């Protein structure tokens, strides 16, 4: 049964209630949605898909939809506008919930043209973010970027080369009726046609793949981790890149996964168990100057810094971030990024490699941080990222890597490859 065929006033009410919770912006949207579905287990798979897709569609298009709705719209009006404008539903499809008194209003909502809206509103960006992007791109480029950010992200997998290869994984997925194709950029990437449930898939359970955006895979490849080396993933999080590095190292050497969060490192443990890796050492640190960090000074062959950032490159997945972040938060982050990069650099041995990466779109979190670091650390030089990626058969021009959703169909990522002079 299709999602639209199940459309009822009760289902609409669930979306309305959930949207009210999301717009408090107390917690990340994906966590709020997950909690809501745990509280309402009676909702079936298609019902949950409708509710989640609809509220996320509103979060993506919040500014332009609110502008179309008129003064002080309520959440009911916001959802009707979302279904009519963002999801393209007709008044006939909305009939189960649309009141006769709302029909003329909704026709007016649909009649507003995007070109009638101010640029930042049209792009569904807060003013401060639009202004930052305007310093980097033309209005036309921002419109293309915003349109790409307002589309849901595809689902990418990374092949675990310790267990299988891409051709064999594609064959297994096909056998399970899952449509998939090789990724365009990463030699490890598989892109799924749809978004099937994967948690009970045999190839997932035996560790043959992990879910990881294709762009994120390239950040790990830039480190070029090798057999027998000492490697540090300085901000490991839940460990997606850690697992990639361990496979690159062929499960040899020592791979440290540093993070300040116990919870994130705990989330790494089941992934490690599936992966077959035994060379990973998760280490919780208090901050970037922790004694556990200082003990490795000058010893690491390679260090990856996937720095805490605004996350604005991930708006396809986390559209609430553009309404939760602000210019002040970005200023605090850039100071933290500089401190983390400087601390991580102390671990790198002479001749070793340091990769700085973010999932931000903003120059001040990306190239500006790297340029300031290089100015303050003459013992490090920039290694052209395009030359490193070419060794993996990936042709992406640029001394520093900048992935953009409208160009590369990945999340927005940045990375710079630095080397300590021998």
Image (tube, rainbow, N blue to C red):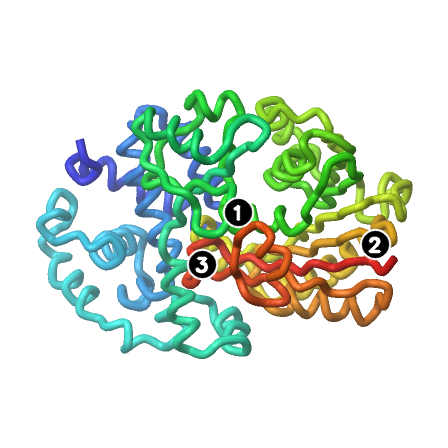
Q: CA distance from mark 1 to mark 3?
A: 32 Å
Neighbourhood count class around disc 3 (C-alpha, 10 Å): few under 14, some 14–19, many 20 upward: some
Neighbourhood count class around disc 2 (C-alpha, 10 Å): few under 14, some 14–19, many 20 upward: few
Q: Secondary structure at mark 2?
A: strand
Q: Where's residue 275, x and y in %?
A: 59, 26
Q: Is residue 211 above or below residue 66?
A: above
The quarter in which the N terminus is drawn is top left
Q: CA distance from mark 1 to mark 2?
A: 45 Å
Q: Where's residue 177, x and y in %?
A: 30, 28
Instruction: Say if mark 1 contacts mark 2, CB within 8 Å.
Output: no
Q: Identify which residue, 106 or 420, lies in the foreground.
A: 420
Q: CA distance from mark 2 to mark 3?
A: 32 Å
The residue that appears at 89% across and 48% down in the rendered structure is 298
The residue that appears at 49% across and 46% down in the rendered structure is 213
Q: Which mark is residue 408?
A: 3
Counting residues from the start of the chain, the first of labels 1 and 3 encountered is: 1
Q: Where's residue 180, x and y in %?
A: 36, 38
Instruction: Say if mark 1 contacts mark 3, CB within 8 Å.
Output: no
Q: Which mark is residue 26?
A: 1
Q: Identify which residue, 312 or 92, lies in the foreground.
A: 312
The residue that appears at 78% across and 39% down in the rendered structure is 229
The residue that appears at 48% across and 59% down in the rendered structure is 323
Residue under pointer 2? 351
Looking at the rendered image, the disc whose residue lies closer to the viewer, 2 or 3, is 2
Q: Is residue 389 above or below residue 172?
A: below
Q: Secondary structure at mark 3?
A: helix
Q: Where's residue 236, x and y in %?
A: 68, 41
């Amino acid at each position: 049964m299709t999602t639209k065929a199940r459309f009822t006033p009760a289902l609409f009410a669930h979306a309305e209630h959930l949207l009210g919770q999301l717009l408090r912006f107390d917690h990340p949207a994906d966590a709020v949605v997950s909690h809501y579905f745990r509280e309402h287990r009676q909702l079936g798979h298609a019902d949950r898909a409708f509710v989640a897709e609809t509220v996320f569609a509103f979060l993506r298009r919040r500014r332009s939809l609110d502008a179309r709705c008129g003064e002080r719209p309520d959440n009911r009006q916001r959802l009707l506008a979302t279904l009519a404008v963002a999801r393209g539903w007709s008044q006939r499809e909305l009939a189960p919930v649309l009141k006769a008194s709302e029909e003329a209003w909704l026709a007016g909502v649909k009649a507003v043209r995007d070109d009638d809206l101010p640029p930042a509103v049209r792009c569904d960006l807060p003013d401060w973010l639009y202004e930052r992007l305007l310093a980097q791109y033309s209005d036309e480029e921002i419109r293309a970027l915003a349109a790409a950010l307002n589309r849901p992200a595809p689902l990418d997998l990374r092949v675990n080369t310790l267990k299988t290869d891409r051709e064999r994984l594609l064959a297994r997925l096909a056998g399970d009726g899952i449509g998939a194709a090789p990724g365009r950029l990463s030699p490890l990437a598989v892109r799924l046609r749809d978004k099937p449930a994967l948690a009970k898939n045999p190839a997932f359970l035996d560790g043959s793949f992990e879910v990881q955006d294709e762009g994120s895979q390239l950040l790990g490849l830039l480190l070029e981790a090798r057999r027998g080396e000492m490697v540090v993933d300085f901000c490991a999080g839940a460990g997606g890149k850690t697992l990639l590095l361990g496979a690159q190292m062929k499960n040899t050497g020592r791979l440290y996964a540093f993070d300040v969060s116990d919870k994130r490192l705990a989330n790494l443990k089941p992934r490690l168990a599936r992966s077959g890796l035994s060379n990973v050492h998760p280490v919780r640190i208090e901050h970037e100057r922790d004694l556990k960090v200082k003990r490795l000074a000058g010893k690491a062959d390679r260090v990856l810094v996937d720095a805490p950032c605004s996350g604005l490159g991930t708006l396809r997945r986390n559209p609430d971030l553009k309404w939760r972040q602000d210019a002040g938060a970005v200023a605090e982050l850039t100071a933290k990024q500089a401190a983390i990069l400087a601390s991580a650099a102390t671990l790198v041995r002479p001749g070793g490699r340091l990769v700085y990466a973010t999932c931000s779109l903003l120059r001040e979190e990306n190239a500006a941080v790297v340029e300031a670091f290089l100015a303050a650390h003459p013992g490090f030089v920039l290694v052209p990222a395009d030359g490193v990626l070419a060794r993996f058969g990936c042709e992406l021009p640029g001394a520093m890597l900048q992935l953009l959703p409208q160009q590369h169909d990945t999340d927005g990522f940045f990375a710079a490859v630095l080397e300590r002079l021998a």
